[in-house]
Image (cartoon, rainbow, N blue to C red):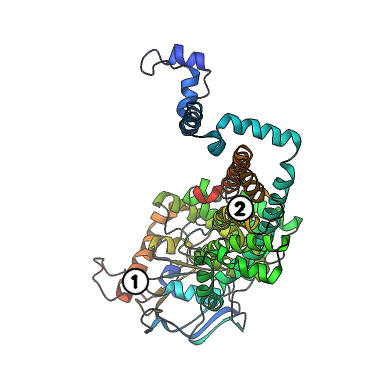
Amino acid sequence: MEKTVFVSQDDPKVANLTSSSVRPEANYVEVDHVSIGYRSRKTGIYKDAVVDLSFDIRRGEFVVIIGTSGCGKTTFLEAVAGLTPVSKGQIRLGGKPIRGPGPERSLVFQSPSLFPWRNVRDNVLFALQAQHKLNSETRQRADDLLDLVGLKGVMDSFPHELSGGMKQRVNLARALVTRPELLLLDEPFGALDAQTRGVMQHELVNVWQAADLGEARNALFITHDVEEAVYLADRILVFSKAPASLAADISIDLPRPRLPEHKRSSEYILYQDRVLNELYTASGGASSGLEPAPKGVSQ
Amino acid sequence: MSIAPPDERFSVDNTEGEPMEPAWMTWGRSHSKVVYGTFGVAVVLIAWQLTAWLGLVNVTISSDPIRIIRAEISLFSSGQIWGPLGATAQEVGWGMLITLVISIPLGLILGRVTALYDMTEPIINVLNSVPYVLFLPVIIFWFGIGEESRILLVIWAATMPLIINTTAGVRNLNPDYLRVAKMCCAGRWTFYRSVLFPATLPYILTGVRLSIARALVGAIVAEFFLSGGGLGYFVQTATSNFDMDSAMAGIFIMAVAAVVLTRLIGRMERNFTHWSQG
């Protein structure tokens, strides 16, 4: 693999982080003054999960939403998925408002949510079957995808025979097999141990960068792990504590391909500190215990 | 270590520790349930036979195991039993088939549609709690004393446990499966066939097991009241003729049939729902 050369810290590019954009194309996702609330089934009390959220996502961007647990980021992702209705405002996808789930969107669930009565291959094929896209070409694609995520040997195994990391790979393959334009990931590696999590992040980056898989695809990734966010993102949106609003919008101007060893490099650490600081400020100003971000990095 | 042939295992690997053990003891240990079960049955049968031989009970009233075996042989060699056995099998077969076709889809739908569930729940509970035999006079009044009435009583007996179990299974559906189906844009038919049915199958098969037990009771009761063949009628007639050996032989056949059917469902549960125990 080609070794990436990092820009030095006094490079003007680093000083001007927020200005860059990956592709100067039209907006793909438009979030327009969106509020999402829910009524508690027991008490009947209405609660806001997300309040007055507005931002756009350009075509081809890998966007990571970061926020503390229970801040409403998952609710927002579900609204983009079409599983939860918005109570105010509009989320548009390619100009059209979202009214429900669609074949151009896939969700990688927080828990693997595999069907235990189907083997690995059939779990992936379910997505195609549901959309009436099952044919010899798509079957081949499913096999290729399972190969790509390292599951070639266990295609006939059942979910209960797999480890947590392997289940999440199946979950990912099931989401990708329908060639979605927008891939939604809801803390997909949150339940994995640190080592597996690192491997999975790397594989996601690989799959994301694999040429045969994609047109300019979008991803919306939810996490509360700062290191993970910086490693994966073109752009990080920091959500405030509940009810969520947009606290910061940080472009991550780091070259691809990104490799696991880059995570400990100074550029990555600088970004991580900055995101962490924003996160602490956004979640109620608890003392971060960190030095303020270096001048070149602050907004 | 399990790959090593037995002789090697005992002579080389296990010079100390594990003591040697004859093969039949190993078999007995791993099949202890079967061994004890058979032993229990044997004790009862031998006691019965002994009391009969010692004249403690009157064999014309109680029969005994050896006389039952003789009766069994004569019933099968003369072909006398095939008629009643076939009649009962037919009632239970048709009854169960109709029960499956009605109850499983109905249970799936009732479990999904909350309004329908709330509407039907009290009715189903009442129908399940009232002893179904009580409906027999009404069924006879409506449908006569033909085979339809017997099959109807079988259905009446068998259908409620299956509906209740299927509905309970659907209502316990893992919400994640529902979200996956929604997210994959699965249509209603795909959802019912490829998600809801397989997810509920462990509950359905438990329901079928309860159903079959009740179907057998339903068939026998129907035969008692609506004469015209069947094992129930056979046992009743044999008893009235003081032919206790044949009556007991008929009961024994019924017992074997019940055990075989229950075992069959148990095997289906293990084969089709291996994933839910793992």
Q: Horizontal and vertical percent for residue B91?
A: 69, 55
Residue nearer the viewer, A116 or A279: A116
Q: Residue at x 57, y 71 (%)?
A: B110
Q: Nearer the viewer, mark 1 or mark 2?
A: 2
At which x and y percent is residue B201?
58, 56
Amino acid carrying mark 2 in the image:
Leu
Residue A227 spot, x, y in % from top left: 40, 60
* Vertical side of A294 occupied by B100: above or below: above
Which residue occupies 57% across, 64% down? B163
Amino acid type, residue under disc 1 in the picture: Leu
Q: Find out whether the residues at labels 1 and 2 contact each other: C-beta distance under 8 Å.
A: no
- As drawn, B16 above or below B268: above
Which mark identifies residue A279?
Answer: 1
Task: Determine the chain carrying the residue at label 2.
Answer: B
Asked whether B90 or B185 is in front, the reply is: B90
Judged left or right of residue B120, residue A247 is left
Q: Which picture quadrant has residue B208?
A: bottom right
Judging by the rendered image, the residue that carries numbered circle 2 is B216
Q: Chain of mark 1?
A: A
Q: Is residue A178 above or below residue B58?
A: below
Task: Classify mark 1: residues with Cα within 10 Å, few (<14), some (14-19) or many (20+).
Answer: many
* Quarter location, residue A23: bottom right
Within 10 Å of the Cα at label 2, are there few (<14), some (14-19), or many (20+) other Cα atoms?
A: many
Residue drawn at x 31%, y 74% is A283
